Amino acid sequence: MSASPPPAAESPARPGSARASFLALFPSIMLPMFLGILDQTIVATALPAIAADLGNVERIAWIVVAYLVATATAAPVYGRLGDAFGRRKLLIVSLIVAMTGSTLCAFAVSTEMLVAARVLQGLGGGGLISLSQALIGQSVPPRERAQYQGYIAAVAVIASTVGPVIGGLLTEFFGWRAIFFFNIPFGLLAILLLLRLPPGTGEKEPFRFDWMGLVFFATFVWSTLVLVEALRGGALAAMGPALALAGLAVAAAILLYFREKRVAQPLLPVTLLQNPSIWRADALAMSHGALFVSLIAFVPIYLRAVYGASAAEIGLMMLPMTAGVGFGGFAVGQVISRTGRTAIFPSLGLMIVGAMLLFLAFFAPAMSMLQFAWFLGVLSVFLGTVMGVVQVTVQSEAGKRMLGAAAASVAVARSFGAALGTAIVGAVLFAAVGATGIAISGPLEAVLQGSETALSGIDAATEAAIRAAVSTGFRSVFLTIFVFSMIGCALSWTIPRRMV
């Protein structure tokens, strides 16, 4: 079933007209996509400084998780509304919401306030990448999408590469709050560029939004993530709330499934997820999100706590990793456009990623900071083989009428996987560090802050013990992320559609 050719409605566009259409659209969607990727990476190098300033270092992962889970919740809403009312209009709305949330992040006075503001920022960010991908999908026929994914990969390279560097430099010289002001002028420029595009027509049929589907979906997403947090540390006192949350998540998932099967205009069309190529590709996106975003979120903590790197140094050391993903995606996009082969690339790439993560788990302490950074850079090139293949596969299987829902399903899967993976890795890290007898807050916050004032209260032996405990804890982190890579690898090998 899934190996059949794409629907005829998508095929008549000629290469020349497709290129002209894409190039006319690309400048206007480039900035929203850039900002969507930037918001995921620019905060990474600031996390140690934020934790040291606001406290609650054990909650640091939720600064990333809150954004990702809000993105996952909002993406299908934007996809469905974009299909109905026009994607340009909804992309402008998502930019306004994201900029509002970003401004509130800059004024946060506590970790809880920052997390809440990141939720609002994520509710806007949920549309930036998925709507941009859908706008491309409606302009370019399936076989040529792989080639144009190279342009998208180039945007991802730039955003992923400069994000940690900009975040590190702004944090070093202006404080961490400056990173949330940085994207405001770019967001305003993106809105002006989008206003130049012709408005979309949307669906002709009457539209009704699936509010109950959204309630069930949001309940499932949030209860699952809070469940992971409740289980952190394995305290017996958390078992009661954890069981209640697990029951709520299961009930919400069951109700969502039957609701989406019955409703005429579903938020998440289950007909898409009944396609084996689509659900496996979405699950692959989930595994990739868990793997890559966990590295983005926790490598800065490793660099600061183990090597004593400053915010600016962390940004520079993250360059090979963030650039590697973009380079891998660009290269694979070009090869797909010439050969038509798709799933073989993540199938092989994730096998190599898994082997390299196993190596890190046991030999990372023997590496210098520069060796560690370049090793992650090589690993990330193979990570870059995944998302372009996922997008091409899902869009080719879904057809033009369901492009918005298809692109949203990928965004939901990746964001939910990233949020769940980051929460799991955070729980594993702080449980492993706590098992060594090192206090999670207090001295660890001082090491993360790294200033002479902060470190004056602890002696050199204690500081060395903290760095050793974090290094030991990261063995469990790399092994956990290795599991994510193996799940993704298994999914890659079983995707039925292997060519476009």
Image: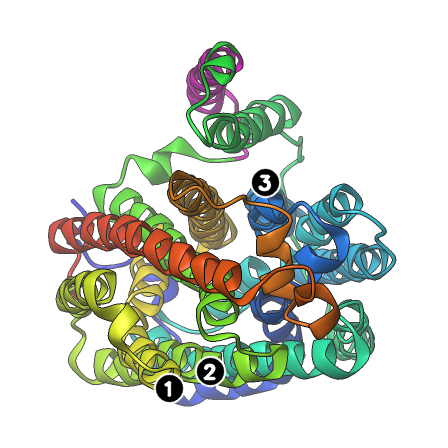
* Contact between labelled residues 3 and 2, with CB atoms less than 8 Å apart: no
* Contact between labelled residues 2 and 1, with CB atoms less than 8 Å apart: yes
The reply to whether residue 203 is visible in this rendering is no
| Crowd around label 2: few <14 · some 14–19 · many ≥20 (10 Å) | many
Q: Mark 3 to mark 1: distance in Å?
A: 38 Å
Q: Is residue 17 above or below residue 255?
A: below
- Local SS, label 1: helix
**Does the magenta portion include 259?**
yes
Q: Which mark is residue 317?
A: 2
Q: Which residues are magenta?
A: 241-267
Residue appearing at x 39%, y 32% in the figure: 270
Q: Is residue 394 above or below residue 208?
A: below
Coordinates of residue 16 in the picture (x, y in percent): 42, 90
Residue type at numbered disc 1:
Leu
- Local SS, label 3: helix
Residue appearing at x 23%, y 48% in the figure: 483
- Front in this rendered view, residue 407 or 250: 250
**In-image side of 491 versus 245 (left or right):** left
Q: Which residue is mark 1?
A: 370
Q: Mark 2 to mark 3: distance in Å?
A: 32 Å
Q: Which residue is mark 3?
A: 73
